[in-house]
Amino acid sequence: MNEEVSMIALPYDYFLIVWFILAAASTAYVAFDQFNGNPEPTVMKWGFILVTLYMGPFGLLLYVLADKEPRPGEHERFTAPLWKQGIGSTIHCVAGDATGIILAAVVTASLGLPMWIDLIVEYIAGFSFGLFIFQSLFMKKMMGGTYWENVRKSFMPEFISMNAMMAGMAPTMSLLMMGRDMRAMDPLELVFWGVMSIGVMVGFSTAYPFNVWMVKKKVKHGLMTVRSNDDAKAHDDHAKKPAMDKMAHSRMAHGSGHQMAGDATTPQLVALAGVTGFLLISGMVIPGFSVNLGLSARDVDASIMPPGMINTFDLPGEAMKDMAAVKPRQVTYIAPLDAKGDQVLQPRIENGVKVFELEASVIRWNILPDVAVDAYAYNHQVPGPRLQMTEGDHVRINFHNNLPESTTVHWHGLIVPNEMDGPAKITQDPVPPGGSYTYEFTVGQSGTYFYHSHDHPDRQQALGLYGALLIAPKDPSAEVKADLDYTIQLQEWLKREWLTYPAMSMEGAMPNYFTINGKAYPSTDTIAMKVGQTIKLRFIGTNNNFIHPMHVHGGPFEVVAVDGVTLNESARYQADTVNVGPGQRYDVIWTARKPGKWLVHCHIPHHTANNNVEQHGGGGLMLVLDVK
């Protein structure tokens, strides 16, 4: 069983870990320094602590540059510049409002509410927490007056400041949460908190200029100094302090409250409220032109989209989950480096019935020694185990689903009872995670077939849920014989930035690795032959996307069967290339005419490279017939 740290999926997750360690250290320093003598109101101490928690080292930077008393008795003079007072005013806003926003985001995500509702709830929660708790309640002692008087006086400046902050936070959260990495919508993921940190920093930046103006007009408080009686006396005795320091000290240290006599006019405040309101609405609505704000955290299930995927406002959550990367923490088995797929699955016999046991699960599988994919697999191998039957057999396949999603099994090309055919929600209910289903039928055909998932096959088959199903004719003489018999199952993979995605013929999902029987050249098999020997190559289009023109060097072959049906001798033909499309099968007989290493490969050159790189002369869909 593979147990990975669930938080690590992409390279920047390591950066996030470092970021939060720095944020914790920065917050600890600010908290210690604030309560160890920085002379300001308690609410401001907590304001800087909260903002540093959200903004990490940048919060620490703001504290050191604008608020931390450089030397005893200098806080008043040090914090006097308007730009620093504006930082203090913005701290009031961000500490309260962002706390409400973040708490609301956690609750709405947990409840599975759509993103657009999330934004509205976040705004209401942030504004309410900032106005009723952080401003009117926590600052009541400093502001003087009754609680409801403070609510009335704080409403307009808080409204302006909150609008400006949310105008920055809303689009940041929408575009990052609904972008490529939608773990950002899940509070249990580091990326969620990383996006919150970025959102708070952007919100601080958009709110700051408005807060500077309001401080200048005495509509909002900036930084303040509060000293104990002993500190105040020491401050008074400090040598040659400028008059402005003493005035500030007498106002801030000894006053019964910090009432503001605003210089802003009503038209100015209304204009500011209108502009910030417009910015707020724009910030909440415009992202909806690019991303689907109607989705919730549950709808997207912490999906990570492939690089380059085109996200649109009408892209459904189901489509996102279909294209999403396999989550590394869902891997339950790591296959040995030299493991091979397509191993014959031996049945047991029960009352004359051949019984096969088949299980689907998430595994890690090496397609090259240094390239592993997180795959969906039958019986811990890619391709799944080979099922060998004989025409006329009665077979029972006991299937168990250990995937994190529902699935079914389809027997491609076989004539079976309808309820055994496998299409999800059409002939059977999908087999849920942890569930089982028994497929049972009598085999009435012979030839080359395969089985694969038929529940979201664009995802599941692309990730490895397929395997060969070879049926011998009841009359052995009816089979076209060769000295050797080799099955070639084709597949396409998308592996980027450590993650495995289902390869699809669409933007951002095109494959970059290609395999034969679960391995890419030069890790594919080398088949030893002797001059004069024949080999039956069974090409199976177990892939989802491309037609692969499979070509054999060293002379033509004879096509003897198509889609499981053996051709009459008069219908057989010579060729050196067959176009194997998804779902198609070709049986061909090739004769080793001359000694040497003869290639079997796809004739699309991109498909004979590994992530566009050739290794030992090629890659991908290549194998060697080594004739002695």
Image (cartoon, rainbow, N blue to C red):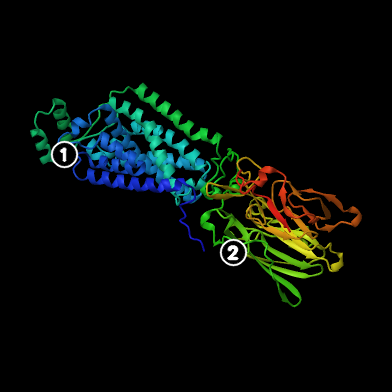
Closest to the observer: 119 or 48? 48
CA separation, marks 2 and 1? 65 Å
Q: Say what amino acid the circle numbered 2 marks.
A: Gly
What residue would you read off at disc 1?
A: 227
User: Which residue corresponds to the image point at 38% horizontal and 47% vertical from the top-left?
Assistant: 18
Q: Position of residue 186 (x, y in %)?
A: 47, 49
Q: Are marks 2 and 1 in contact (CB under 8 Å)?
A: no
Q: Say what amino acid the circle numbered 1 marks.
A: Arg
Horizontally, residue 278 falls left or right of residue 467, namely left
Quadrant of the rendered image containing residue 205: top left
User: Which residue corresponds to the image point at 37% horizontal and 21% vertical from the top-left?
Assistant: 267
User: Which residue corresponds to the image point at 57% horizontal and 50% vertical from the top-left?
Assistant: 500
What residue would you read off at disc 2?
A: 434
Marking on residue 417? none
Q: Position of residue 234 (x, y in %)?
A: 9, 37
Does residue 616 lie above or below 155 as drawn?
Answer: below
